[in-house]
């Protein structure tokens, strides 16, 4: 670039940009392009990476808090089941039955007081068959106590044990247990959330009384502390607990592991309005961020329902957002550093490559300038074997040939050399034209092969037969456990849903069964006596690699179960587990595998459609009436002048002015057609689709080939005529020169005959 040349003002449109870019050298253009691409790719990668990382981390955090909520709900459910079991054991006491038979209520009250303390209950009473209180654990008098309308008591009076949450008056609980006043002090609420259970006391298949007891959740932090210990294990971040668990009565927190400024469990805070509408009103499970005590938490909240299904409260699990955001910030910083290093590295590599490539080009440019000035002695040094090296070698060969040609031309004379060079150039152009026509003709051969292949392949878009995706309930499941009761219950649950289930109590029998039959899912206890979980997983995968392996594990084997899942097991379920849990896990695993297979098929269909639309040959499917029912992009461009007109449903007569299928052979083949309506010439291939009433038409546009072939014939004839005229003229001139010199050299004659022979061969090739 000329340094004195004035740089134009940057562009207003594309033409201005290209005009402005012309002022820069090739080196500056290439280097600027490389750096521009490097910066753009770096920024794009940075933005996409940060968005993906943030989305992934937030999504994983939401999954984690949802999983923690499920664990918390499971622990609360365990408390409920344990309470029901305790009440059942108290109600089954023979001493209480004997005391009821004798009417010895002081003895019953003493027994209730002892059971009350042993089982950590807040209230415990005995009701008569009408639901009225007859004995309390800590009260001599039992007046005013009628629980006949309580849903759990009603169920117990009908002979069925029951448990659940409910909201009741606190003064009634204080009547049962006056020590509850100490828990609240002076701020005694009107109502409280309790976990209650009732069980019938039977005598000769008749309900003679009901044992009723429970726990007051308000200001009782044992449950939430146990859940918090299980979930967060006293982990802290910047001096604050990593997470919290809270139980709400309605929208008011009555029990919480969250600490206030006084380091005491915080109660009395409320769920915000939108969360309250979704959880306590609509009964939904909600995962969303909240702010409590000047800290932001990511929480998951689930409603608590009473025995009748009514929402009476909620349980909430939250984790601090600061650790999550700090991970995102560190990741963003790492992405920034990586992107910056990538841009710097790309800039250095680009500068080196541009200098490396541009150096021999500058040398060739200098040599070309010297050659233009008449110096044909300078050659470019060849330092590589790549395309640039080949270009330098070709340039040197050209310089040598030019030097030799100039020497010969000087010997032949200015007039003869000028005309021969002119005609030789015309002949070279003719040869290049012939080669281009041959290359265009190769496209026709390619279309022949394509038609042959497409006529013998199946349609990639064949729909799956109905029901091919299969029913999840028809899957085969192998259960492995040493406990025959667990096997019996799981087998009954899964078979009721339509699964084919096989059970075994031995690893050896299970592995033998896998060698004989194919199973979709295997559910095995990780603590089998024959081998550990990891070794068992390896043996199962050796026999059936595609099988879904699910583990059942007690609390002490949880760590081993997690490691086994990392090695390839699908998931694990902690013991004890409910019937719905094993059924949900099996359905989830089978559905995930089914959706993966479906996604793979959809991707294959999309790839097939993309390939079909990108084919350069115009392809269409026609029905019995010769109407277009399906076509690719090339066919639309051939049949539509604007490339946007609708061709679907139109006949070939309407599109092209002629119907190619009227003269086409039923067995297929090819023929040339002149499509008068669109002004094109094409070669037609057609054949029938297997087992369908459709025909495939492939139209290869050969208009340009025909035109160039005609032009080549005219040019060839003119060139041969001119060449013959020039050769005869040069023969005459050469003979005159030879006469002046006294003789005609053998070299001159040979050159002239060689030109005549060359002209004859060019004509013969056409």
Image (cartoon, rainbow, N blue to C red):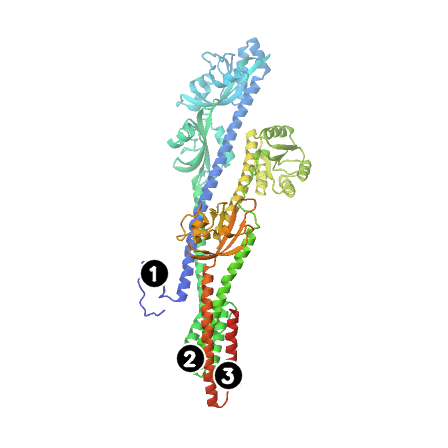
Looking at the image, is 352 positioned above or below residue 243? below
The residue at which mark 1 appears reads as: 15
Residue 224 location, x and y as percent? 48, 30
Marks 1 and 2 sit apart, C-alpha to C-alpha, by: 37 Å
Residue 616 location, x and y as percent? 48, 55
Q: Which mark is residue 374?
A: 2
Tell me if 238 is positioned left or right of 8 in this view: right
Marks 3 and 2 sit apart, C-alpha to C-alpha, by: 26 Å
Dot placed on the residue nearer the N-terminal end, 1 or 2: 1
The N terminus: image quadrant: bottom left
Q: Nearer the viewer, mark 3 or mark 1?
A: 3
Q: Could you classify mark 1 by the number of other residues whose Cα lies within 10 Å: few (under 14), some (14-19), or many (20 or more)?
A: few
Residue 733 location, x and y as percent? 45, 84
Q: Secondary structure at mark 1?
A: helix
Residue at image coords 47%, 28%:
221
Q: Nearer the viewer, mark 3 or mark 2?
A: 3
Q: Which mark is residue 748?
A: 3
Q: Could you classify mark 3 by the number of other residues whose Cα lies within 10 Å: few (under 14), some (14-19), or many (20 or more)?
A: some
């Amino acid at each position: 670039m000329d340094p004195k040349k004035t740089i134009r003002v940057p562009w207003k449109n594309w033409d201005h940009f290209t005009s402005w870019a012309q002022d820069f050298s090739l080196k500056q253009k290439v280097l600027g392009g490389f750096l521009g691409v490097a910066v753009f790719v770096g920024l794009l990668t940075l933005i996409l990476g940060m968005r993906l990382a943030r989305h992934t981390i937030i999504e994983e955090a939401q999954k984690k808090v949802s999983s923690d909520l499920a664990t918390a709900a499971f622990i609360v459910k365990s408390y409920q089941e344990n309470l029901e079991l305790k009440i059942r054991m108290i109600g089954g006491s023979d001493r209480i039955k004997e005391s009821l038979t004798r009417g010895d209520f002081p003895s019953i009250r003493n027994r209730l007081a002892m059971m009350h303390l042993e089982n950590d209950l807040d209230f415990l009473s005995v009701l008569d068959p009408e639901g009225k209180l007859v004995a309390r654990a800590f009260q001599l008098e039992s007046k005013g106590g009628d629980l006949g309308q309580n849903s759990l008591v009603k169920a117990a009076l009908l002979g069925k044990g029951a448990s659940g949450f409910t909201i009741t008056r606190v003064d009634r609980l204080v009547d049962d247990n006056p020590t509850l006043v100490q828990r609240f002090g002076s701020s005694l609420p009107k109502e409280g959330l309790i976990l209650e259970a009732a069980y019938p006391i039977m005598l000769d298949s008749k309900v003679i009384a009901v044992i009723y007891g429970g726990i007051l959740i308000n200001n009782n932090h044992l449950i939430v502390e146990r859940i918090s210990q299980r979930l967060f294990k006293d982990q802290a971040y910047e001096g604050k607990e990593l997470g919290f668990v809270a139980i709400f009565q309605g929208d008011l927190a009555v029990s919480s592991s969250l600490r206030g400024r006084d380091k005491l469990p915080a109660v009395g805070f409320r769920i915000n309005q939108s969360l309250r509408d979704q959880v306590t009103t609509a009964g939904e499970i909600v995962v969303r961020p909240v702010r409590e005590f000047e800290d932001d938490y990511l929480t998951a909240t689930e409603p608590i329902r009473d025995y009748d299904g009514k929402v009476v409260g909620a349980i909430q699990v939250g984790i601090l957002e600061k650790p999550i955001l700090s991970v995102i910030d560190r990741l963003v910083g790492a992405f920034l550093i990586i992107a910056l290093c990538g841009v710097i590295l790309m800039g250095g590599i680009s500068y080196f490559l541009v200098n490396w490539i541009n150096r021999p080009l500058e040398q060739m440019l200098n040599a070309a300038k010297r050659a233009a000035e008449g110096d044909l002695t300078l050659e470019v040094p060849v330092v590589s074997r790549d395309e640039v090296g080949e270009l330098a070698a070709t340039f040197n060969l050209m310089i040598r040939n030019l030097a030799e040609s100039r020497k010969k031309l000087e010997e032949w004379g200015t007039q003869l050399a000028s005309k021969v060079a002119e005609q030789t150039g015309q002949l070279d152009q003719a040869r290049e034209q012939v080669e281009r026509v041959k290359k265009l003709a190769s496209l026709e051969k390619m279309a022949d092969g394509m038609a042959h292949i497409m006529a013998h392949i199946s349609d990639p878009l064949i729909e799956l037969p109905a029901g091919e995706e299969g029913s999840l309930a028809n899957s085969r499941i192998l259960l492995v456990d040493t406990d025959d009761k667990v096997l019996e219950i799981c087998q009954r649950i899964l078979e009721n849903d339509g699964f084919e289930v096989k059970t075994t109590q031995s690893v050896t029998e299970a592995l033998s069964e896998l060698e004989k039959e194919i199973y979709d899912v295997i559910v095995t206890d990780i603590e089998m006596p024959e081998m550990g979980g990891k070794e068992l997983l390896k043996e199962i995968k050796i026999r059936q690699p595609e099988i879904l392996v699910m583990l059942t594990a007690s609390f002490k084997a949880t760590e081993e179960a997690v490691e086994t899942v990392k090695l390839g097991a699908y998931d694990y379920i902690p013991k004890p587990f409910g019937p719905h849990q094993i059924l949900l896990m099996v359905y989830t695993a089978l559905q995930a595998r089914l959706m993966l297979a479906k996604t793979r098929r959809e991707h294959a269909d999309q790839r097939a459609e993309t390939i079909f639309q990108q084919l350069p040959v115009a392809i269409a499917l026609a029905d019995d009436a010769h109407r277009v029912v399906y076509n690719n992009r090339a066919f639309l461009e051939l049949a539509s002048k604007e490339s946007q007109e609708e061709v679907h449903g139109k006949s070939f007569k309407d599109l092209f002015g002629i119907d190619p299928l009227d003269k086409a052979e039923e067995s297929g083949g090819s023929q040339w057609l002149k499509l008068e309506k669109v002004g094109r010439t094409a070669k037609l291939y057609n054949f029938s689709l297997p087992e369908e009433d459709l025909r495939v038409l492939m139209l290869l546009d050969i208009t340009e080939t025909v035109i160039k072939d005609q032009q080549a014939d005219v040019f060839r004839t003119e060139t041969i005529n001119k060449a013959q005229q020039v050769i005869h003229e040069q023969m005459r001139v050469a003979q005159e020169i030879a006469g002046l010199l006294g003789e005609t050299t053998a070299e001159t004659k040979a050159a002239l005959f060689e030109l005549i022979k060359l002209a004859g061969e060019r004509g013969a090739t056409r």
